[in-house]
Image (cartoon, rainbow, N blue to C red):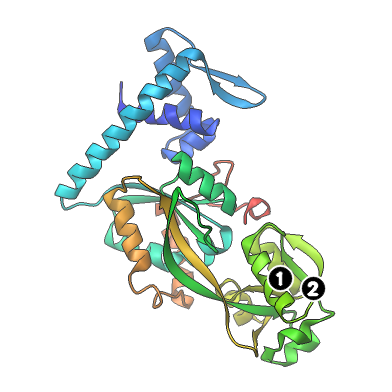
Amino acid sequence: MHIETLKVFCDIIESGSFSYAASQNFVTQSAVSQQVRSLEEKYDCRLIERGRAGVKPTPAGQILYTASKEIVRRFMELENRLREIGSVVAGSIRVGTVYSVGLHELPPYLTEFLRNYPAVNVHLEYLRSNKIYEDLVEGKIDLGVVAYPAKRSQIVSIAFRHDELVLVVPPDSQLAKHNKVSVGALSGQKFVGYERDIATRKASDRILRDHGVKPQYVLEFDNIETIKRAVEIGLGCAIVPRMTVENEVSRGTLKMLEFSEGTFTRPLAIIYKRGRELSPAVRKFIEVLTHNNGAAKPGRSERAERSSRSERVERATPDGNRDGTEKVEKLA
């Protein structure tokens, strides 16, 4: 029996999904099914039951899972210690982040990390913020990168960087004649925004409320890409992180306005589970993110390089998709 098979089995039980376990271990779903069958044949008993609620362990499967979890944990600790002695940083990293950060903030850091540590595979998964915290606690991911980090006893938070929040409007809007706008001048404007439970939406509402503006939301979405498309076709204005709209502003499909009151920012943080032993690869990734992070900003050449980097950075949506496409309707 291989340790990798036990890890795959643990991932199936924890996620309730064969496809998710496959994406986490960089194998096909059929390979995962074959590994489960080999375990059931070896022990001559059924280990997993499938139902409407998903995949669940049988009593025998629960016994195997409990023991395997500890075996996998101890084995990973051993690997980490041995890799620290050696000179090569290798392995895989599972990173959970919201869509706007993963697409618009992380690429320059990923480029630098993969250039310096080519033996590491980075699995980038787009999740809602609350799911990132849950998956960290459950051990499904190694790191999270979130906006407006929440204080939780089980989570360690490391400051990453700050986004500038700006207003975007359609190019033919009356507001588009200006480069700056007062927050108070937005009274009566129609807004397109994030859904109400998303931290960036709460922060935007707080800015408006503090300046006596009651926003009129005509549309609410859970991802930045749909918000931008709605603004482009004239359905309203939106308060968004500057880096998420650089491409549209350069193409002229959106007009960006700064706030005359000053700069409003969105804090980003790297988070991981308290007490978890971080692998050398994870620690090096944190070092890359936090070292001189104010200087790493994607320019035109960086954006052009993203497609060539995709074969080494696995991107997965919550359903375990790994074909390199982002399903924006499900992402924060």
Q: Image quadrant for the C terminus?
A: bottom right
* Front-lying residue, 4 or 251: 4
Above or below, 99 against 73 in this view is: below
Tag 2 and tag 1, C-beta contact below 8 Å: yes
The image position of residue 321, as x and y in percent, is 55, 43
- Determine which quarter of the picture holds residue 231: bottom right
Q: Residue at x 40, y 19 (%)?
A: 64
Tell me which amino acid carries mark 2: Pro
Q: Inspect this view and state whether residue 152 appears.
A: yes
Identify the residue position indicated by label 1 in the image. 205
User: Disc 2 versus disc 1: distance between alpha carbons?
Assistant: 8 Å
- The residue located at (81%, 81%) in the rendering is 187
Image side of residue 71 versus residue 183, left or right: left
Q: Secondary structure at mark 2?
A: loop
Residue 215, numbered label: 2
Classify 105 as above or below 23.
below
Residue at the image position 55 percent from the left and 30 percent from the top: 16
